[in-house]
């Protein structure tokens, strides 16, 4: 069932999860004669929803061996897992949409295990069977991006958005890929589109601020970071980015306030400690 069908049926979309990305995109701004290096933390990727449940095989389809529930991990080393676990008689009873859901679930399990190539294979089979499901294109894009195929990921995010134009996670993640390519204007369009449907998502406000900051639009970036902090006061990354933006504007007092708040939440956050030292040095001049 597509997202639009789910929406009409009144089904609530499961919340997206955030990644534990450790890489950073670097923005270097020189603040007057002080030559302060400003480093914004990277945009955050929104992850896929929980794996779809395996469709039940209709009654009367003949005997079948018990298969593991959708939440269990696939057998190690079985790249072709999925419907192959079902007896042939059961497989024949499933519709293409049910088969696609099964492959999507298999892909999601493999994606969680870091087996990106295998996950991509499963998602591609799901897409082939159910090409108008935006979630499968979205999950395929996630797997492709994690596997290093950003061009392929962009294509799949766009396909997901063709089917469901208001898909905020797809807009957000596509925006992140565009930021990485330096296509900041395009990225900002997608972040703003995501916020049209999810204005209360602090991480997307933070991502928008990051893109604006890289363009040197510090006033707009600050507004986005402040909104992220308003929505999530303990958002360390947004506090840090806000402090860095103030530092770039030669506003050390404001920077110190935000960086101090970030360190109250996460005392060992080294980037904030370094930036706080720079802000105090700037204030003392």
Image (spheres, rainbow, N blue to C red):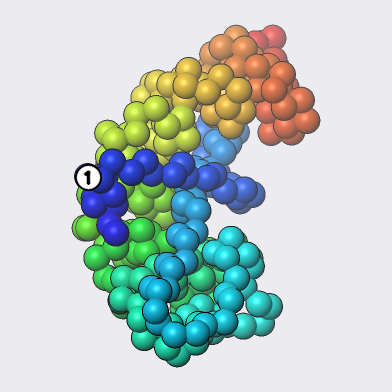
Name the one closer to the observer, 167 or 227. Answer: 167
Identify the residue at the far right of this view: 268
> Residue at 62% across / 83% down in the picture?
78
Question: Where is residue 35 shown, x and y percent of the image?
Answer: 59, 29
Question: Where is residue 59 shown, x and y percent of the image?
Answer: 40, 74
Quadrant in the picture for residue 204: top left
Name the one closer to the observer, 204 or 184. Answer: 204
Count of marks, rendered view: 1
| 63 lies above or below 57 | below
| 201 lies above or below 176 | above
Quadrant in which the N terminus appears:
bottom left
| 28 lies above or below 126 | above
> Residue at 60% across / 23% down in the picture?
234
Residue 35 seen from this side: no
| 232 lies above or below 48 | above
Quadrant in the picture for residue 279: top right
Identify the residue at the far bottom of this view: 88
> Residue at 36% across / 71% down in the picture?
98
> Residue at 52% across / 45% down in the picture?
17
* Residue 199 relative to residue 80: left or right: left
Name the one closer to the observer, 121 or 218. Answer: 121
Question: Where is residue 82 shown, x and y percent of the image?
Answer: 51, 78
Circle 1 crowding by C-alpha within 10 Å: few under 14, some 14–19, many from 20:
few
Question: Where is residue 176 shown, x and y percent of the image?
Answer: 43, 49
Residue 87 seen from this side: yes
Quadrant in which the C terminus appears:
top right
Return the residue at label 1: 8
Look at the numbered disc 1 and give the secondary structure of its residue.
helix
């Amino acid at each position: 069932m597509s997202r639009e069908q789910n929406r009409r049926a009144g089904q609530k979309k499961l919340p997206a999860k955030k990644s534990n990305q450790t890489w950073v995109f670097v923005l270097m701004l020189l603040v007057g004669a002080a030559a302060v290096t400003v480093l914004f933390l990277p945009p955050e990727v929104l992850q896929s929803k929980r794996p779809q449940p395996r469709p039940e095989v209709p009654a009367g389809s003949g005997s079948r061996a018990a298969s593991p529930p959708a939440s269990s991990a696939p057998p190690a080393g079985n790249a072709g897992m999925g419907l192959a676990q079902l007896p042939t008689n059961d497989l024949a009873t499933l519709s293409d949409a049910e088969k696609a859901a099964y492959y999507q679930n298999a892909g999601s399990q493999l994606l969680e295990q870091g087996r990106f190539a295998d996950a991509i294979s499963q998602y591609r089979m799901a897409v082939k069977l159910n090409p108008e499901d935006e979630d499968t294109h979205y999950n395929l894009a996630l797997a492709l991006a994690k596997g290093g195929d950003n061009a392929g990921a962009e294509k799949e995010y766009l396909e997901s958005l063709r089917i469901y134009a208001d898909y905020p996670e797809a807009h957000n993640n596509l925006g992140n890929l565009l930021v990485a390519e330096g296509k900041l204007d395009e990225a900002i369009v997608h972040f703003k589109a995501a916020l049209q449907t999810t204005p209360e998502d602090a991480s997307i406000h933070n991502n928008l601020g990051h893109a604006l900051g890289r363009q040197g639009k510090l006033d707009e970036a600050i507004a986005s970071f402040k909104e992220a902090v308003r929505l999530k006061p303990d958002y360390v990354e947004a506090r840090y980015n806000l402090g860095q933006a103030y530092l770039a504007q030669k506003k050390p007092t404001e920077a110190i306030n935000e960086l101090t708040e970030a360190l109250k939440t996460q005392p060992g956050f080294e980037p904030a400690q370094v930036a706080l030292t720079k802000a105090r040095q700037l204030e003392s001049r």
